């Protein structure tokens, strides 16, 4: 069966939704750009280490990649940099545009009785701030943000397993929705179905996918649970 033909069936079988944040819910760094945040974190790091930072880190232009690098090269500074990334993510969330169709999707899940957990590699503080700002907190039952240990970020399945525990979800009726390969890999590792949110059709892939959140809102709005 072609992957798109599986979508209605998959939506009908989904009782619990795990939803990635940056992409499906908002464009977190759409206004406050990730390279600007990474540059300011590198400046801060330079002050802390008292000189130039390790050259492996110097060209990193993404805050989470930088955090990952710091955890390997300066493990003792991981907590400090993680806290700065969390602050920057909260600042970014205040400006981030909500993804078209995201609100409709969350409403469709609420109307059809499907609990939603947001499972993000970003800090839970930023996720909660954005939900609060846009009046969406009541549509989300659980927020699973980044663990202080960056090794437990997706594609590690740990955050998905923790979110399922919080929802009381059965993996067999849970679907992860995300726009990165790390979301899909984490879903596989957690033994749950996944729907990819992609701008381009994948080549030769059996992975179910959609091009926008409006399509998902329609799919989940149209499917009522038995
Ligand atoms: Mg994402």
Image (tube, rainbow, N blue to C red):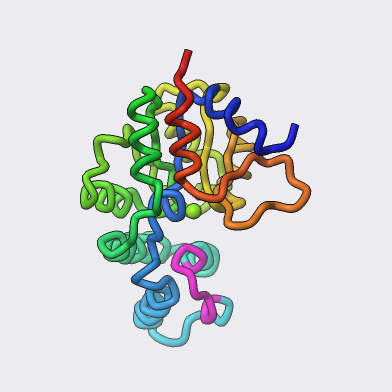
Judge by depth and name the residue closer to the eye, 97 or 189: 97
Residue lying at 36% horizontally and 41% vertically, measured from the top left: 104
Q: Is residue 46 magenta?
A: no
Can I make out residue 1 in this image?
yes
Q: Is residue 21 above or below residue 59?
A: above
Judge by depth and name the residue closer to the eye, 140 or 3: 3
Judge by depth and name the residue closer to the eye, 220 or 56: 220
Q: Is residue 100 above or below residue 158?
A: below
Can I make out residue 49 in this image?
no
Please, what is the dominant secondary structure of the magenta stretch? helix
Judge by depth and name the residue closer to the eye, 121 or 5: 5
Range of magenta residues: 57-66
For residue 94, side relative to residue 68 (left or right): left
The image shows residue 213 at horizontal and vertical percentages of 46, 46
- Counting every numbered tag in the picture gives 0
Residue lying at 32% horizontally and 66% vertically, measured from the top left: 88
């Amino acid at each position: 069966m072609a992957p798109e033909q599986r979508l209605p069936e998959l939506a009908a079988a989904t009782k619990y939704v795990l939803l990635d944040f940056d992409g499906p819910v908002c464009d977190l760094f759409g206004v406050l750009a990730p390279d600007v945040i990474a540059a300011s974190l590198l400046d801060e790091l330079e002050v802390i280490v008292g000189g130039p930072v390790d050259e492996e880190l110097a060209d990193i232009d993404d805050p989470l990649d930088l955090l990952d690098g710091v955890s390997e090269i300066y493990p003792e500074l991981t907590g400090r940099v993680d806290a700065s990334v969390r602050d920057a993510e909260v600042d970014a969330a205040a400006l981030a545009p909500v993804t078209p169709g995201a609100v409709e999707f969350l409403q469709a899940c609420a109307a059809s009785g499907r609990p939603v957990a947001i499972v993000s590699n970003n800090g839970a503080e930023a996720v909660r701030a954005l939900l609060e700002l846009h009046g969406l907190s009541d549509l989300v039952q659980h927020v699973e943000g980044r663990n202080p240990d960056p090794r437990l970020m997706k594609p590690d399945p740990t955050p998905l397993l923790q979110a399922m525990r919080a929802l009381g979800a059965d993996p067999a009726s849970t679907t992860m929705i995300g726009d990165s390969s790390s979301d899909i890999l984490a879903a596989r590792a957690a033994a749950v179905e996944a729907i990819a949110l992609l701008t381009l059709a994948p080549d030769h892939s059996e992975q179910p996918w959609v091009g926008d959140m409006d399509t998902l809102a329609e799919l989940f709005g149209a499917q009522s649970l038995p």
